[in-house]
Image (spheres, rainbow, N blue to C red):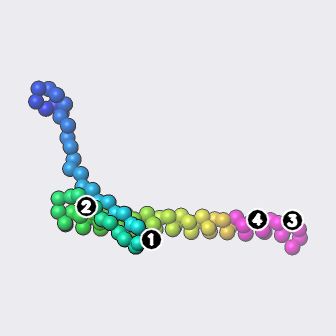
Amino acid sequence: MEGNGGQPSVITEPTSILTLTYYPLRDKLDVDVRCSSLDQALDMLERARRTLESQWRLRQLAAMQQAQADAELRAALAGQHSHRTGG
């Protein structure tokens, strides 16, 4: 895409910024919002909540699957050990 005079055009996308900073010792949450409206800021917060929740659930699922795999491996190794020792 070219602009005036044959120079390449730069297409810019408006950026909205939402920064959350939590200070646990003071139990204080700072919210810095740079967007065009309150509705947009609230939408961004809701989307961030859903994203965080999804990531959290995926990490929890992966941890549970790893724990189950570890337990199965320990059980298999214990079975091999007791079989070799006659127990």
Task: From the image, tell me which residue sits under label 2.
Answer: 33
Category of crowding for the residue at label 4, using alpha-carbon neighbours closer than 10 angstroms: few (below 14), some (14–19), many (at least 20): few
Marks 1/3: CA distance?
A: 55 Å
Residue shown at the point (84%, 68%) measured from the top left: 83
Residue shown at the point (53%, 64%) measured from the top left: 62
Task: From the image, tell me which residue sits under label 4.
Answer: 77
The amino acid type, in three-letter code, at marker 2 is: Val
The magenta segment: 73-87
Q: Is residue 74 magenta?
A: yes
The x and y percentages for residue 71 are 67, 69
Marks 3/4: CA distance?
A: 11 Å
Q: Earlier in the sequence, mark 1 or mark 3?
A: 1
Q: Earlier in the sequence, mark 3 or mark 4?
A: 4
Question: Of tags 1 and 4, which is closer to the observer?
Answer: 1
Camera-nearest residue between 41 and 86 = 41
Q: Earlier in the sequence, mark 2 or mark 4?
A: 2
Dot 2 falls on a residue whose secondary structure is strand
The x and y percentages for residue 43 are 25, 65
Camera-nearest residue between 82 and 66 = 66
Q: Picture quarter containing residue 72?
A: bottom right
Please state, as top left, top right, bottom left or bottom right, where the N terminus lies in the image: top left
The amino acid type, in three-letter code, at marker 3 is: Arg
